[in-house]
Amino acid sequence: MWRWRNGFVAICGISLILSLLALWVGHQKQAASAKIELGRYLFYETGLSEGHSLACANCHQQMFAFSDGRKTAINVHGDKGRRNASALFNLAQNTSFTWANPLQTDLAFQALIPLFGDDPIEMAAGSVEQIQQRLASSSIDYTSLFVSAFGSSEINLARITDALAAFQSQLLAYDSRYDRYQAGQHDALTEFEKAGLALFESERFGCRQCHEGSNFNQFMGSRHNQATKNFHNTGLYYTETGYPSSDLGLYEVTFDAADRGKFKTPSLRNVGVSAPYMHDGSMRYLAQVVEHYARGGSVNLNGIKGDGKLNPNKSHLIKGFDMSEQEQNQLVAFLMTLTDETLLTDPRLAKPD
Ligand code: HEC
Ligand code: HEC
């Protein structure tokens, strides 16, 4: 009898612990998905900017793989910035954020730049109180969104940036035709595109030396190296005074003369929809990008006089190569297979109704 009772009590105890554990895990999951949902509302929220004029999503639009289709971004005051808005996906695979700052490694912190940055001004969010007021006057019930995500209605910067990062970590793009081909579906690429892939991987074209790894944004030598190894001067410009001073890239962080004109190697996923290209949006077409590499640098690009091929800071990995017109078309056709249609159309990533 006693033994039976003890066993019964023990089983009850264990099941109680298990159900509490399940409840807790469920609660954590719910909080995580509530944070993502809040982040999604905030990503599409113009109330984070001066005069309700811009949301993150204005410069990071789903149909362009969360870039904006513009040469360079346009801020709350309608002024053009100097840099092309980055496409946003697979952000966990970035060793750093923005085009040329190896110190910028925290996705949540990154949001403070468009919100409060003054060089360039982007969203001009103002004070935390102003953000709170704008969110309070919104038709969206932010009070309950913050309660579900964080357990109380307090709106502060840590919570806003944390939720934005949670949403952005959902922007995943690993389901392109190229990925299906890699996974063994041989007919996912045409013969023409496969020929382009072979050129991309070839030593002659040398693309993989920098666009390495599953996200095409790692420099081969960089894994156990300092983060700045992912930055290169690809020979876009070389004026009488050197690199155009409007944007010196990595140099602006390191002040090392050799870093003038070095920018982060971007992912090549979704380049089919994220034109224009390069840190300053100076190239409209992929064919033009491929020509640039074949020549080993660009001449008089973007109306800026000079031959980037001769830039002494240019990476020694960009030497130029011979290619036929057919090969150029094949390489471009391959780059177009890196588009993940789900990223562009998934309603869970779109503006909430
Ligand atoms: C006015 C247009 C504009 C707005 C609004 C904007 N961004 Fe950006 N975003 C850019 C530009 C331009 C860059 C590249 C900046 C650079 O390299 O200096 C960028 C870069 C980024 C990056 C780095 C991506 C990478 O792979 O390096 C992230 C992340 C990002 N933005 C998130 C956000 C979030 C979150 C918001 C809203 C809080 C936002 N952006 C609002 C234009 C904008
Ligand atoms: C030395 C390293 C290096 C090599 C080799 C290289 N790239 Fe790049 N690639 C970069 C960097 C760095 C950028 C950005 C440069 C800038 O904006 O100033 C870039 C930009 C690009 C872009 C524009 C992406 C965007 O979102 O704007 C494309 C497309 C591209 N490369 C394709 C290629 C192809 C194809 C090859 C081979 C023919 C190649 N790259 C070889 C480093 C490299």
Image (cartoon, grey):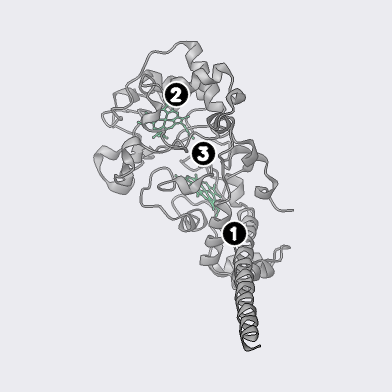
For marks 3 and 1 on the same chain, the one whose residue lies earlier in the sequence: 1
Task: Name the residue rendered at 61%, 54% in the picture.
Answer: 43
- Res 212 quadrant in image: top left
Amino acid at dot 1: Leu
What residue sits right under mark 3 in the picture? 72
What residue sits right under mark 2 in the picture? 200
Q: Nearer the viewer, residue 279 or 216?
A: 216
Mark 2 CB in 8 Å range of ligand 2?
Answer: yes
Mark 3 CB in 8 Å range of ligand 1?
Answer: yes
Disc 2 versus disc 1: nearer the observer: 2
State whether residue 204 is above or below residue 232. Answer: above
Residue 195 appears in the picture as rendered: yes
- Res 144 quadrant in image: bottom right
* Mark 1 surroundings: few (<14), some (14-19) or many (≥20) residues within 10 A: many
Percent of width and height locating residue 130: 58, 67
Q: What separation in Å lies between label 3 and label 2 (alpha carbons)?
A: 27 Å
Task: Name the residue rendered at 39%, 38% in the picture.
Answer: 218
Task: Name the residue rendered at 53%, 24% in the picture.
Answer: 334
Disc 3 versus disc 2: nearer the observer: 2
What residue sits right under mark 1 in the picture? 48
> Regarding mark 1 in the picture, which secondary structure is present there?
helix
> Regarding mark 3 in the picture, which secondary structure is present there?
loop
Q: Quadrant of the N terminus?
A: bottom right
Q: Nearer the viewer, residue 259 or 129?
A: 259
Mark 3 in CB contact with mark 2 (< 8 angstroms): no
